[in-house]
Image (cartoon, rainbow, N blue to C red):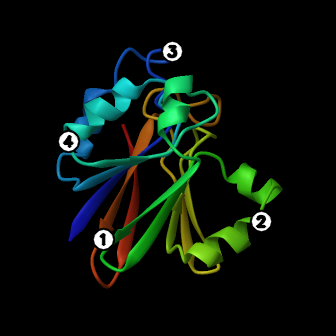
Amino acid sequence: MKQVGLISDTHIPARAKAIPNKVFEVFQDASLILHAGDLTRVSVLEELEQMAPVIAVHGNMDARKVKERLPTINSVDVYDWKIGVTHSLNFFFRNSGFREITEKRGFHVFVSGHTHRPGLKYKSGMLLINPGSPTNPIPPFITRSSVALLKITKKEIEPEIINL
């Protein structure tokens, strides 16, 4: 089994001085971390990379250096599962058509951020997951910070949203 840590909307240092220590506890067994954008600084990647390799995308609030370094959409294969990541699903619904992009790339899981609200659902057999934000939940509906984990085997993917 492999564990993949999911994180988004860290907004360092605007919304928090650093990634909360609880994130590192949750990700301690992760073999990979996916960041769905709005890091705001490259140093966030460097800090997460001390735990595990990081696949990331840029978000709408990221600094120029982050946007130059990271793509809008990224993907990784874990066993035979294809996992995609982007910052905002709205970009794909509005512009190119979410279904077309996800079917063309054959994603089994699609990770997004932007809303700061954790959630998971299945759409046409694909898992859509948003880990929320570990530093900036948006009240009044979301008052707890969160991240997510994917526990992946060759046969299944078990998603979990974790409140910090």
Q: Nearer the viewer, mark 1 or mark 4?
A: 4
Marks 1 and 4 sit apart, C-alpha to C-alpha, by: 18 Å
Quick one: label 4 or label 2, which is nearer the N terminus?
A: 4
Left or right of 115 on screen, residue 41: left
Query: Disc 3 on helix, strand or loop?
Result: loop
Q: Which numbered circle lies on residue 97?
A: 2
Query: Disc 1 on helix, strand or loop?
Result: strand
Marks 1 and 2 sit apart, C-alpha to C-alpha, by: 28 Å
Marks 3 and 2 sit apart, C-alpha to C-alpha, by: 32 Å
Query: Disc 4 on helix, strand or loop?
Result: loop
Picture quarter containing residue 163?
top left
Q: Amino acid at mark 3?
A: Ala
Residue 6 lies, in percent from the top left, at: 40, 50
Quick one: label 1 or label 2, which is nearer the N terminus?
A: 2
Q: Amino acid at mark 1?
A: Ile
Q: Amino acid at mark 4?
A: Met
Q: Check disc 3: other Cα within 10 Å, few if <14, some if 14-19, many if 20+.
A: few
Let me know if residue 38 appears in the view: no
Query: Disc 2 on helix, strand or loop?
Result: loop
Let me know if residue 14 appears in the view: yes
